[in-house]
Image: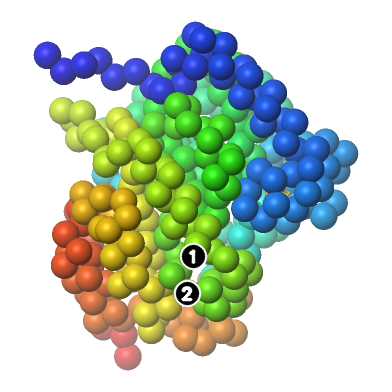
Amino acid sequence: MAERFEAAYLRLLRSGELKRRVARAFARLEACDICARECGVNRHLSAEGAGCRTGLRAVVSSAGPHFGEERPLVGRGGSGTIFFSWCNLRCQFCQNAEISQLGYGREVEAEDLAQMMLGLQAQGCHNINLVSPSHVVPQILAGLLLAAEAGLHLPLVYNTGGYDSLKTLALLDGVVDIYMPDMKYADEEVARRFSGVRDYPAVNQAAVKEMHQVGDLVTDERGVAQRGLLVRHLVLPEGLAGTAKIVRFLREECSPQTYINVMAQYRPCYRAYELPPLDRPVTAQEYQEAVRLAQEAGLRLDDRRPRLLWAWR
Ligand code: SF4
């Protein structure tokens, strides 16, 4: 008989370790190194100097069931998303710039976050999907502790832009069941130009390798994700996303069984209109080439790839 699934953090809750992780995470906000930017500012005092522009409280733009995520996350009940405002990256083509760069949303306490998580569970969602969590891990852990004490049992999805610190991923070891990192670029200069962090490729690859501690993606008999790694890779015009290097990294450094969503939906947003070649969508050929590379690497491709490919030009 299949083993009954239990969200990872429940074991840490019982041992008291989850509470200790909250304290350790908040202590690190005094000279913040929660994400790979390592700003060193004291977020207990203010958000001044913080690359993520976030102080002691997390800011949330929205929370609710989401049906547009990858099929293993959505199932029938939807993915229970909590969108955090602000971001530790500066992607010039961000589709959610009002949230990530202008900070639309409201400050929340740990109790508010716990209520959101429990509310999503009560609505029948299959997981708690933390969108843009990298800069608010202490606040998430505090909310999770309260929610778990009150009966939360859904797996956590860490849905990140992929610029994460290994030290913080250690805090999440045994807490997160499903990691869903972006792999945006393989080239330092492209990363600097379009997301403001030159070391993105090295940081991102080290982080994804560490996230693979949860193994390849495992689903239950309904096809709903329980645990594992799911990578998102947005195809950019003129091969800027470095697909060939990224799929080779996944095959050789993580696992040939890595689940990957090669995404076709790039459209110019935010400042991309001033930054050719990001001022146009990807072509059908560019997308097909990225899919071909992932297939050749033997990776597990998300099956919701667009069937109708558009012609650009
Ligand atoms: S979370 Fe990252 S961006 Fe924000 S202050 Fe800390 S190190 Fe800087």
Nearer the observer, 276 or 26: 26
Q: Which residue is drawn at 62% across and 53% down?
A: 36
Indicate the amino acid at tag 2: Asp
Nearer the observer, 116 or 229: 229
User: Which quadrant of the structure image shows residue 121?
Assistant: top left
- Disc 2 target residue: 187
Indicate the amino acid at tag 1: Pro
Q: Is mark 1 within 8 Å of ligand 1?
A: no
Q: Does the residue labelled 2 lie within 8 Å of ligand 1?
A: no
Q: Distance between the residues labelled 1 and 2?
A: 6 Å
Residue 183: image location, x then y, percent: 42, 60
Q: Which residue is the extreme one toward the right?
A: 45
Residue 268: image location, x then y, percent: 49, 75
Q: Residue at x 38, y 84 (%)?
A: 238
Check the image and report above or below for 71 versus 192.
above
Residue 313: image location, x then y, percent: 32, 90
Q: Which residue is the extreme one toward the front?
A: 253
| Badge 2 element | loop
| Badge 1 element | helix
152 on left or right of 73: right
- Disc 1 target residue: 201
Check the image and report above or below for 28 versus 257.
above
Q: Which residue is drawn at 63% across and 19% down?
A: 20
Q: How many labels does the image show?
A: 2
Nearer the observer, 131 or 191: 191
